[in-house]
Structures are given as structure tokens and as C-alpha cells.
């Protein structure tokens, strides 16, 4: 097996995981000892700080994020009486749409949530950025320095320098500012918190935490069926050798950076089949797991031998998908083992192992729900929902463990199931969706079910809150349909803004077929368009200044209101000039233009990965059938509070300054947001004057 990470997932080098694991156990132990020794001094320092600060308005602030929860759908379900706990919040407190960011993409939105600033001040503009030298995509949020200094002893390489990882999100989070004033925060799985920052609190990182292969999530599919290599996007097909009732292969991990030539780590995988009993025994890392077809295993520990006395630990889940003429085994991405993390995923370093001891093993991958396994039809709807709700259950256990220990301060936790289920099951909510396929009646209620699941969780949370606690429930954006994809690079090519190399057909990924000497504009990522600017891009041809401004104006005029000729619908509502949307020190890193797609449209799968070939507008056939990468005005998030806010039109950037104000702190001048509460008197809940269903969605 050649474990080449799928191109769609651009992540850090897997060698970072291996080198980090060399010292992680020692560092974790040392950090715990130092923390205990310094505790009396930190407690005294916090006491002195607390005496100097303004009086907090609250005892505890609890912020619950439901990624992607949509206000229109929430309002309808409240009116139908299906969300009683949300209805009670609306009746006595607040329910309002929450303005999202430009663009309405999760890493951008959650970064603005955490910092209270627009993207030009926090430097996150999409999932992906681009390398100005090569035009290749890079993760927008993290930078890995993989330069090595090693001592070579025969076939072994002893690292003399540890690689470093750096968070590219700028500005300051509200929990960091709270910590400077002695106010504790526990932050669980908020996107764009990898690597975890040091502050007065505890954190478990989320989005952009890689798997052991160094990707953003690559599942494995072991099979006796012919074929091999990449499985579309996000997966690797691996051949099973053997026959009759016994098959074998290997599970390959990251490169072994301790060995000359950096061979990949690997452990044997053996599958023994009992067709009569409809069972398979899967043996890995010295442990045998008996699996029935279609049933997911629990978390399985994988121990990769590195060197004498050194092992790299990961976890995965497995499922036998075929057990007849052919034998096939699905394996989730290889998650970092939280009990023995191979790279920093929490602050303090021992927090992830502590959680693993308390609640058991849990998913650590940034995008943990395997949407690509469902997109490529390796797993079915039921398996995807099982994985998603299991991860949600792990998150809930962490949340209540943290809430039980929190006496004063903030608790922030983001739950992802709403976003993931809507992405994959929107196709069942509307007639004629090109990705609907079979199974509609059985899965048509999946989205409503996750909203009701959220409602029940809110009820359990409120039971544990006191009169001096404040609860905020919010989402980073809403949702809409993704029926048709727009090949933006194809449009640029057809209209003379992008040129191909001689003889190229435009099918190469990551803009590999583009002739930069004749290209003026290109698209990369989910929402961004860039000018091929001279002096910025390595092969730029567009002169900055007046010529660049004229080109932007020309593109805005041509693409705003662009129609889908086949459907006679508007595909792109507006093309936005980022320089007119916001300002800040990192505006130069932003896309020059942002694509504001209409509901039902999104950038096509090919265009997002730099493919030029294909129709400008075409059906989206994938299970990923709902999205939010559209005109942000179409997909606001949702805000609930158990208190009445003093703002008519709340924004996501208002949450950070609100958190500071609730603890008696003035937001710093650089924050673009403003507190939602004007005074401590604002925090008094009001008795409902009308039925909750009629109050839902009212702006205050």
C-alpha cells in the first residue's frame, strides 16, 4: 500500500506528528508537575488581579455553538412545537438572526467569534490560502516548520531540533483577555484553535487538527475488489491479499523520521472470515476485534513501532462492508490518540489525556465526521449518522464534565453535528435535488432530528445553570441548498481572463494546467478570487494600482448577477471587493474578490481544487448537498440567550466583546464588535408576554 494523502486535504507533514510524539509523554508529565508546584503562586496572582478588576456581572458564562444551525428552519420548528427548550429561551430571553462574516465559511466565522474582529484583522479568509510562489493551496490557519537538524547514527536519525507549528490566526481571543484578568475559561472544540494557545484556562483544539497521515482526514478502504489508489477525494483504496477465509494487508502511518530514507511506519492487518456465522475477526496491534457486517467497532488503538522503546499511537473505527464474494473493510481516518497525543492538541498538554481517562477515547481530527466516506459511497447514511452522533455524544460528555468543575468563568463548546448532517442530508429535504438518490423517505427527517437533538441538549444544560449564569446559544452561519456547482475557473477561461498551457485540457488539479504568463485572474478555495498581481504572485502580470482596480471593476460587473443558462436562474448574486468590505493589517492576504453565490449554488468541486475543465454550471451529484458558502446575507446564524439583549441586529463579532463586558471588562478598542448588553440590569430575564411560537425570531 502506498499511502498518499488525498489531494483534497492539504495538511501538515505527518513527520511532525512523529517527532512531536518523541517527547510528548515526558513534556506532559513535566507540565503536570510544574503546574502543581506553581499553583499557589498562580492563585495568589489571580487574587491580586481580581481585586483590581471591575466587578463581574455574571458568575459563569456558558456559550454553546451549534455549527450551522439555521434561523429560518429553527423558527419553523419552534412554531410547529418541536423545539420546546428553544421556544422557552425565545419567550423569556432572545431569539434573533446573527449576522455572519464575509465569507460565511466556518474558519472565518469562528475566528471572528473568538476575536471580535473582521477577517482583515484576524487573517483567516477561507479553509485554504495559496503559496504565492507556486500557486498551490496551503492551510490558511497553520504553518509548519519542518526543517530538520539530525544526528545520523547508521540507519537511525536522531532529531536535534523539534519541528514547530504556528497558528496563523491573529488578534486576541476573548478567553485570552479574560485569562489576563484571572478569569478561567474552558474552550472545547472551537474551530481554528490548533495549535492550542497558552492562556489561563483549558482548551481542546478542533478544526485543522490533522490525522496521523498529516492530512485533514483520509479514510482507508481495504478490499478484494480490483483497483487501487485514491478514492476520489478523501480516501485511499488498499488491496487485500490472500484468499478463502484469510486476508492480510498493512496499515501505514506517517513517515518514520527516525530512520534513514524515512520509510512509512506500518503495522500488519489480518482479516479472518467466518461466512457461515456472518462475522469477521480483524486483528491489529495484537488485538482481535469481532465485527458483524455493517456494524461499527468502537475505538481501536493502533500502536506503530518507531524505534526501540518508542511507539506512535493512533485510534480509528472499523466496519466490514462486504462479506460475500468480496471482502471489504472501511477504516475511519487515523485520529491522534487523545490519551497519548502525538502532537499538541490541548492546553495544558495533559488536558486531552485527562479527558480521555475521564470519558474514554474520543475523536481528535479537526473535521471528525467522515463526510468523504459518504460522498464516495463507501459508507451509507446510517453509518454516517452513527459516527456523527457518537462524536456528538463524546462532546457532550466533555461539556458536562467541564461545566461540573467550573465555579466561576466561561465555558465555550462547539457541537458540529448540525453542520455535518445538513451538508450531507439536505438532498432529502427538497424535490428534484440531483443528489437525492434512494433512501429519501428513511432520511428525510435527519435534519429535523438533529435540531430536536440540540433542543434536548439545551434543556439539559439549563437544568444545571443558576440565576447568576448567562447562557448564549449560537451558530456561525445558517444553511441553504447546494444543487448546482459553478466552475468559476472555467468561466474565467471562457471569457479570456485565464489561459491554459499549450496542449493542456484543463483537467489538472490545483491550477496545474494554467499558463500564468497569460492569466489575469483565478479562483482557489471556496469563495475567493485572486488577481494574478505583478510583484505579489511569482508570475503575476496585472500591474497593481489603477489597472488592478479596473480589472476588479470589470469582473464585478461581469459576474454579479451571472445566470445559469440551463436553469435560467441567478448563480452568482454579487462579486464583492474585499477592500470595500473591511480593513485591517492583514487585508493584503485576503482574496481580491469574494464570490456571493445564490441559494442553491456554490463553487463546483472541480473549481475549488483548481480544475478548469467542465461546464460553467452543472448539477452537484454528491451527498454533500447543502452548504453555506454563498452570499453571507442569505445565511445568517442564530442567536439565543436566556436574557434579553439590547441590540436590534446582533452580529457574530459581537460575542467576544459581550463576553468581556459580562465579566466587567471593557472591550479593547481594536474590536469591531460591540457588547450585546448595556448594563447589569439588562441581564434580568423577562416573563413572556405572548406564546413562545409567536415570539420566535423577534428582533430586539
Image (cartoon, rainbow, N blue to C red):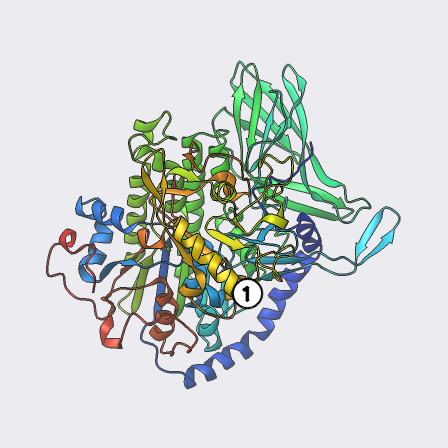
| Image position of 395 (left or right of 150) | left
Determine the residue located farthest toward the left in the rendered image.
Answer: 690
Quarter of the picture containing the N terminus is top right
- Residue 163: quarter of image: bottom right
| Image position of 573 (left or right of 502) | left
Q: Nearer the viewer, residue 78 or 697?
A: 697
Q: Position of residue 224 (x, y in %)?
A: 61, 20
Q: Nearer the viewer, residue 421 or 411?
A: 421
Residue at 23% in and 47% down:
83
Determine the residue located farthest toward the right in the rendered image.
Answer: 154
Q: Position of residue 554 (x, y in %)?
A: 44, 54
Q: Nearer the viewer, residue 595 or 666?
A: 595
Q: Is residue 190 visible?
A: no
| Image position of 590 (left or right of 32) | left
Q: Is residue 397 visible?
A: yes
Q: Please say if 110 is above or below 213.
A: below
Residue at 29% in and 40% down:
448
Quarter of the picture containing the C terminus is bottom left
Q: Position of residue 269 (x, y in %)?
A: 66, 30
Residue at the disc numbered 1:
197
Q: Please say if 359 is above or below 250.
A: below
| Image position of 445 (left or right of 590) | left
Q: Nearer the viewer, residue 327 or 213?
A: 213
Mark 1 surroundings within 10 Å by alpha-carbon count, few (fewer than 14), some (14 through 19), many (20 or more): many
Residue at 36% in and 33% down:
566
Q: Position of residue 634 (x, y in %)?
A: 31, 51
Element under disc 1: loop
- Total labels drawn: 1
Amino acid at each position: 500500500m502506498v499511502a498518499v494523502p488525498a489531494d483534497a486535504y492539504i495538511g501538515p507533514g505527518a513527520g511532525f506528528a512523529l517527532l512531536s510524539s518523541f517527547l510528548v509523554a515526558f513534556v506532559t508529565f513535566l507540565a503536570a508537575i510544574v503546574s502543581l508546584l506553581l499553583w499557589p503562586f498562580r492563585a495568589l496572582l489571580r487574587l491580586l488581579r481580581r481585586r483590581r478588576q471591575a466587578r463581574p456581572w455574571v458568575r459563569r458564562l456558558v456559550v454553546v455553538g451549534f455549527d450551522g444551525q439555521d434561523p429560518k428552519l429553527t423558527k419553523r420548528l419552534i412554531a410547529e412545537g418541536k423545539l420546546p427548550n428553544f421556544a422557552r429561551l425565545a419567550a423569556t430571553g432572545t431569539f434573533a438572526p446573527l449576522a455572519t462574516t464575509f465569507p460565511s465559511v466556518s474558519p472565518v466565522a469562528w475566528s471572528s467569534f473568538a476575536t471580535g474582529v473582521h477577517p482583515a484583522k484576524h487573517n483567516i479568509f477561507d479553509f485554504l490560502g495559496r503559496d504565492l510562489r507556486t500557486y498551490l493551496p496551503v492551510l490558511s490557519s497553520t504553518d509548519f516548520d519542518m526543517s530538520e537538524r539530525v544526528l545520523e547514527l547508521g540507519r537511525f536519525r536522531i532529531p536535534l531540533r523539534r519541528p514547530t507549528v504556528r497558528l496563523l490566526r491573529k488578534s486576541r481571543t476573548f478567553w485570552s483577555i479574560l485569562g489576563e484578568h484571572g478569569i478561567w475559561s474552558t474552550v472545547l472544540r472551537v474551530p481554528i484553535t490548533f495549535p492550542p494557545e497558552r492562556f489561563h484556562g483549558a482548551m481542546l483544539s478542533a478544526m485543522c487538527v490533522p490525522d496521523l497521515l498529516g492530512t485533514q482526514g483520509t479514510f482507508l478502504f481495504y478490499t478484494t475488489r480490483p483497483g487501487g489508489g485514491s478514492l476520489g477525494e478523501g480516501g485511499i483504496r488498499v488491496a487485500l491479499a490472500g484468499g478463502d477465509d484469510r486476508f492480510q494487508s498493512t496499515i501505514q502511518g506517517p513517515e518514520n523520521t527516525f530512520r534513514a530514507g524515512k520509510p512509512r511506519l506500518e503495522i500488519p492487518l489480518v482479516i479472518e472470515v467466518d461466512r457461515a456465522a456472518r462475522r469477521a475477526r480483524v486483528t491489529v496491534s495484537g488485538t482481535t476485534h469481532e465485527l458483524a457486517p455493517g456494524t461499527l467497532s468502537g475505538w481501536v488503538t493502533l500502536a506503530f513501532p518507531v524505534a526501540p522503546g518508542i511507539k506512535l499511537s493512533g485510534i480509528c473505527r472499523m466496519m466490514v462492508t462486504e462479506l460475500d464474494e468480496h471482502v471489504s473493510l472501511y477504516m475511519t481516518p487515523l485520529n491522534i490518540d487523545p490519551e497519548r497525543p502525538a502532537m499538541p492538541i490541548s492546553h495544558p498538554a495533559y488536558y486531552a489525556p485527562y479527558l480521555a481517562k475521564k470519558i474514554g477515547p474520543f475523536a481528535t481530527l479537526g473535521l471528525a465526521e467522515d463526510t468523504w466516506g459518504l460522498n464516495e459511497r463507501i459508507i451509507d447514511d446510517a453509518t454516517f449518522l452513527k459516527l456523527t452522533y457518537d462524536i456528538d455524544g463524546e462532546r457532550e460528555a466533555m461539556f458536562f464534565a467541564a461545566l461540573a468543575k467550573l465555579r466561576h468563568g466561561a465555558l465555550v463548546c462547539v457541537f458540529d453535528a448540525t453542520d455535518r448532517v445538513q451538508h450531507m442530508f439536505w438532498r432529502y429535504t427538497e424535490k428534484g435535488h440531483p443528489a437525492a438518490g434512494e433512501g429519501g423517505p428513511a432520511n428525510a427527517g435527519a435534519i429535523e432530528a438533529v435540531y430536536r437533538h440540540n433542543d434536548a441538549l439545551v434543556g439539559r444544560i439549563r437544568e444545571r445553570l443558576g440565576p447568576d449564569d448567562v447562557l448564549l446559544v449560537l451558530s456561525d452561519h445558517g444553511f441553504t441548498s447546494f444543487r448546482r456547482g459553478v466552475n468559476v475557473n472555467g468561466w474565467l477561461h471562457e471569457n479570456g481572463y485565464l489561459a491554459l498551457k499549450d496542449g493542456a485540457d484543463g483537467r489538472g488539479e490545483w491550477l496545474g494546467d494554467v499558463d500564468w504568463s497569460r492569466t489575469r485572474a483565478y479562483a482557489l478555495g471556496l469563495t475567493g478570487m485572486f488577481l494574478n498581481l505583478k510583484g505579489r504572485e511569482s508570475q503575476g502580470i496585472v500591474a497593481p494600482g489603477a489597472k488592478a482596480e479596473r480589472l476588479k471593476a470589470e469582473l464585478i460587473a461581469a459576474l454579479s448577477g451571472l445566470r445559469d443558462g440551463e436553469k435560467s436562474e441567478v448563480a452568482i448574486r454579487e462579486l464583492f471587493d474585499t477592500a470595500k468590505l473591511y480593513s485591517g493589517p492583514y487585508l493584503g492576504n485576503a482574496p481580491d474578490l469574494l464570490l456571493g453565490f445564490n441559494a442553491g449554488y456554490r463553487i463546483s468541486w472541480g473549481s475549488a481544487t483548481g480544475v478548469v475543465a467542465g461546464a460553467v454550471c452543472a448539477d452537484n451529484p454528491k451527498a454533500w448537498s447543502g452548504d453555506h458558502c454563498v452570499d453571507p446575507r442569505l445565511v445568517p446564524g442564530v442567536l439565543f440567550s436566556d436574557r434579553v439583549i439590547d441590540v436590534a441586529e446582533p452580529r457574530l463579532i459581537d460575542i467576544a466583546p459581550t463576553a468581556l463586558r459580562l465579566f466587567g471588562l471593557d472591550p479593547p478598542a481594536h474590536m469591531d464588535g460591540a457588547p450585546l448588553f448595556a448594563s447589569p440590569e439588562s441581564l434580568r430575564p423577562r416573563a413572556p408576554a405572548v406564546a413562545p411560537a409567536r415570539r420566535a425570531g423577534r428582533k430586539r
